[in-house]
Image (spheres, rainbow, N blue to C red):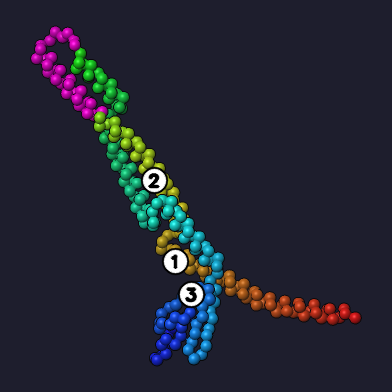
């Protein structure tokens, strides 16, 4: 509404002043009161089907986000990035586990048992006593090192396997939900254009229906008059 000088606030929409040079949108029916002239009632031709389509898309959007435990699409994408980072960390953990036990945990246990038996054995050796002490000390050191490796490797492997399974499952779930969500809503930049096209198409259909109704009304009236005329001719 653009007022002339001195005419501001002479028009209200639903009892609220219609401001100068400010766009005012509405849905359904509104009443415009013009001071000194009268009232004008406007009815929006925005079809209910378009509203329902938009509402259903928004409801699906919120439902998918709720199933992921997030409140926005941006947070869901961030969750996906975190899952990928976690999977990368677990890959490094597996690599470290391979360095500690390249032949597997079972082989590490067997090596530990063998070294323990060697260190605790009461063998009759015909060698220099100094050499025996050195070999014994070296064996004990290897036993201690192997035990430490076992202690580090066992919990690391258990946690790594569990975390990998959880991360892979979360990644697949999040990726599927995001794909479904993006298919329904479309790209962020195109959502407004998609809604505008939907409203334009719905408005065009409404206009065609109203035009068809206007063309059909005279035909119905003519058919009624023709029926009445025939009844008059048949009546004795």
Which range of residues does the magenta coloring cover?
Answer: 122-150
> Mark 3 or mark 1, which is nearer to you?
3
Q: Disc 3 or 1, which lies upstream in sequence?
A: 3
Q: What's the residue at 90%, 81% (across, down)? A: 236
Q: Which residue is mark 1?
A: 192
Badge 3 marks a residue whose secondary structure is: loop
Q: Is residue 113 magenta?
A: no
Q: What's the residue at 48%, 59% (across, down)? A: 59
Q: What's the residue at 29%, 42% (across, down)? A: 89
Q: Quadrant of residue 130?
A: top left
> Percent x, y for residue 9?
42, 86
Please give the label number shown on residue 26: 3
Q: What's the residue at 44%, 77% (across, down)? A: 24
Are there few (<14), some (14-19), or many (20+) residues within 10 Å of tag 1? few
Q: Is residue 39 left or right of residue 122?
A: right
Badge 2 marks a residue whose secondary structure is: helix
Q: Which residue is mark 2?
A: 171
Give the CA separation, mark 2 to mark 3. 43 Å
Q: Is residue 189 left or right of residue 142?
A: right
> Percent x, y for residue 143?
20, 23
Q: Is residue 145 magenta?
A: yes
Are there few (<14), some (14-19), or many (20+) residues within 10 Å of tag 2? some
Give the CA separation, mark 1 to mark 2. 30 Å
Badge 1 marks a residue whose secondary structure is: helix
Give the CA separation, mark 3 to mark 1. 18 Å
Up-down relation of residue 176 to residue 124 (above or below):
below
């Amino acid at each position: 509404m653009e007022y002339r000088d001195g005419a501001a606030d002479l028009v209200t929409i639903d009892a609220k002043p219609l401001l100068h040079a400010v766009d005012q949108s509405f849905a359904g029916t509104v009443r415009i009161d013009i001071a000194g002239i009268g009232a004008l009632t406007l009815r929006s031709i925005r079809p209910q089907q378009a509203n329902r389509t938009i509402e259903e898309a928004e409801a699906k959007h919120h439902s998918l986000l709720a199933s992921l435990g997030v409140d926005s699409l941006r947070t869901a994408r961030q969750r996906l990035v975190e899952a990928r980072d976690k999977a990368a960390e677990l890959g490094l953990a597996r690599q470290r586990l391979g360095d500690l036990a390249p032949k597997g945990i079972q082989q590490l246990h067997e090596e530990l048992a063998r070294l323990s038996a060697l260190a605790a054995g009461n063998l009759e050796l015909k060698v220099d006593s100094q050499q025996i002490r050195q070999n014994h000390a070296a064996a004990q050191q290897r036993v201690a090192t192997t035990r430490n490796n076992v202690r580090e490797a066992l919990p690391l492997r258990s946690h790594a396997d569990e975390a990998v399974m959880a991360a892979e499952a979360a990644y697949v779930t999040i990726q599927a939900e995001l794909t479904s969500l993006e298919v329904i809503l479309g790209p962020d930049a195109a959502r407004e254009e998609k809604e505008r096209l939907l409203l334009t198409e719905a408005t065009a259909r409404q206009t065609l229906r109203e035009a068809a109704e206007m063309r059909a009304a005279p035909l119905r009236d003519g058919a009624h008059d023709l029926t009445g005329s025939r009844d008059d001719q048949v009546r004795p």
